[in-house]
Image: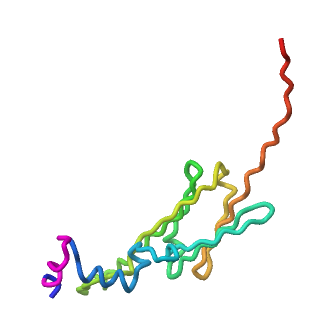
Amino acid sequence: MKHELTGRNAYSDYDFFNDAMQGFFPSLFGVREQGGQKFMRTDIKENDKEYVMEVEMPGVDKKDINIDLKEGYLTISVQKKENNDEEKKERYIHRERSFSSSRSYYVGDIEKEAIKAKYENGMLMVYVPKETPVQEQGHRIEIE
């Protein structure tokens, strides 16, 4: 049946089953909805000393999350793998519990040791300190 449906689209790599699964589970396939991204939705709050990022990550274990800071970009990535030996004996037609995703946020030149993170109940909290503004001191230039 899969092969019969494959030829109906103008694209030679069209896969009916994958297309159907994307419709049911768009967040796992990186498909965006009209309102924006469905996985790793982020709210950013500000207080006097820091920015607080609240990142939704339901169903993810803490060990599967990586947070990196490079060249002013904070990148949050998830790589979830299901590799149970008992499951290898089964013949799956389609699997969706293994996936990877990442998002990057520009935070500027911040000390990496100053950034803190906490994960609890499917919510990742990242605390990014504000840059301390450098006050320019006036300098008089003498005219020759």
Residue occupying image coordinates x 30% and y 84%: 20
Identify the image's colour scheme: rainbow, by chain, secondary structure or one colour.
rainbow
Residue at image coords 50%, 82%: 59
| Quadrant in which the C terminus appears | top right
Q: Nearer the viewer, residue 71 or 59?
A: 71
Residue 23 or residue 133, whichever sits in front: 23
Q: Is residue 7 magenta?
A: yes
Residue 23 place in picture, x, y as percent: 36, 83
Q: Quadrant of residue 135?
A: top right
Image quadrant assignment for residue 62: bottom right
- Judge from the rendering whether residue 25 lies leftward or rightward of residue 17; answer left or right: right
Q: Position of residue 6 (x, y in %)?
A: 17, 79
121 and 53: which is toward the camera: 53
**Residue lying furthest top in this view?**
144
Q: Which residues are magenta?
A: 4-12
**Picture coordinates of residue 125, whole percent (x, y):** 65, 71
Q: Nearer the viewer, residue 24 or 100?
A: 24
Q: Is residue 56 above or below residue 70?
A: below
Q: Is residue 92 left or right of residue 52?
A: left
Q: Is the stretch drawn in magenta largely helix, strand or loop?
A: loop
Image location (x, y in percent) of residue 66: 52, 64
Q: Is residue 86 magenta?
A: no
Residue 92 appears left or right of 65: left
67 on left or right of 86? right
Specify the quadrant that holds the N terminus: bottom left
Q: Which residue lies at the image location 78% right of the left edge and 43% below the top edge?
A: 134
Residue 89's place in the image compared with 111, above or below, is below
